[in-house]
Image (tube, grey):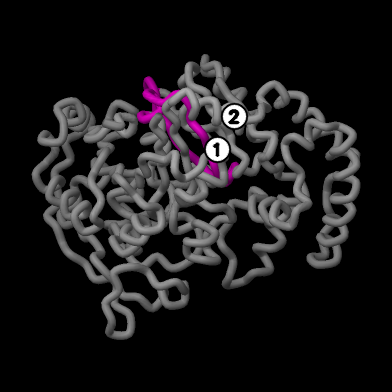
Amino acid sequence: MAVAVVVGTQWGDEGKGKVVDLYASQADLVIRFCGGANAGHTIVSEGKKFKLHHLPSGILYSSKINIIGNGTVIDPKKLLDEIAGIKLAGYTPNLQISPRAHIVMPYHFALDGAEEAKKGGLAAGTTKRGIGPCYSDKAARFGIRMGELLDTEYFKQKLHIMHALKASAIEKAYGMELEKGEQQIFEEYSQYAAQLAPYVADTTLTISSALSSKKKILLEGAQATMLDIDHGMYPFGTSSNTTAGGACTGSGIGPTAINEVVGVVKCYTSRVGAGPLPTELFDKTGDAIREKGGEYGTTTGRPRRIGWLDLATLRYAALVNGLTGLAFTRLDTLSGVPKVKVCTHYELGGKKLSMPPASYKDIEKCKPVYKEFAGWADLGEEGWKSASKKGYAALPAQARVYLEFVSKEVGVPTYFIGVGPDREDAIVLKDVFRTK
């Protein structure tokens, strides 16, 4: 049995989809354990680009079982659109959806936008996809789960209560009117239920059977460590547990079953949304990296904020996730920059901090301390492809110095190095599914 978890170590958009897609070639099950349509993973396969939000990144492998776990929240319309897109591209989705996953309803979208507008300086910069309000209902124990959506009579009864509550809250608290009426929502979501019903299965049993049969299981996180509801930069994060612990609660796999936890590290920092970003660049270097890397949100299209790699954040991610390996991405994007910097630690009030403080107000006051490295040449598309085939020694010497410094500082070995957009553009130093 081999169970591996892949998590983001920064603020999201690290390239987890590429890492998961490559590892999925060896897995039997690929499980998405948190988040919803606010997440965006881009996969390039055979020259085709796929932008996934709900679907696990192993969905292009029809021989693999792909599971949307109980820890997720599902926008059924978006999910159906994704499934249709995959089919149109010639793929057959081998998909199971947990009946315990929660459903994003129209009133969640309305509340998301209204609440963000009222938060002022505490606004998290959400994608307005209804994720936070849906998780709020889940925690308050009156959310609507996938299994309940499929039970027509129960769904109708529950929607009747919830629609009245939410419409009243939206009107009284925000002075707005819920656009869709109860009957309209019922009919629309009943149609979604009928289309999704063939994919719904008790995924707990599927996973348990796979564990008993010693199958290879890959758990895929959404967003990243610094967006985690408990361990991230609160309140400028998401509403779910995006760290490795969330893989257990969001899938139904016990922690003792997990063998590897791989942290995906973009070779620089990026993020979408509000909140302090200590290493953020506001100059031509940041702009150049953004344009070369196409750093615009998969879900929103918003330009991402760019900064140097932050080891304070990365050490913290290694600690709270229990990382066993690092998967670097975008090494090629950072090429061509004459001087590359890495934030080794913060300074706050005359003290040296190796990890971020808990309060975002303190993080705002932190001053990053940098170590400078010589940059490395851009090998070009064919050059990077050649390096990926030849292996680690074929990388530019300066790039290897950079990677080895980061790995040593964090105390976690390197498993994977991405040097291009395609799934083949990678150097794999350790096979996560080889237990011996």
Q: Position of residue 414 (x, y in %)?
A: 23, 44
Could you say which quadrant of the image residue 168 lies in?
bottom right
Considering the numbered disc 1 on the image, is that residue within a helix, a strand or a loop? loop
Q: Look at label 2 and name its amino acid.
A: Glu
Q: Is residue 261 left or right of residue 61?
A: left
Residue 50 appears in the rendering: no
Identity of the residue drawn at 25% across and 64% down: 343
- Residue at (15, 46) in percent of width and height: 399
Residue 227, relative to residue 52: is it above or below?
below
Question: In this rendering, would 346 be left or right of 173?
Answer: left
Name the one closer to the observer, 391 or 272.
391
Which sits in the foreground, 375 or 204? 204
**Residue 20 falls in which quadrant of the image?**
top left
Where does the N terminus fall, quadrant-wise?
top left
Place of residue 16 in the rendered image (x, y in percent of width and height, measured from the top left) = 40, 40
- Say if residue 113 shows up in the picture: yes
Which residue lies under the disc numbered 1?
Answer: 53
Part of the protein shown in magenta: 22-47
Q: Position of residue 313 (x, y in %)?
A: 35, 61
On the image, the x and y values in percent for residue 144 come to: 76, 44
Q: Earlier in the sequence, mark 2 or mark 1?
A: 1
Say which residue label 2 marks. 82
Q: Amino acid at mark 1?
A: His
Asked if residue 38 lies in the magenta stretch, the reply is yes
In the rendered image, which quarter is residue 369 located in?
bottom left
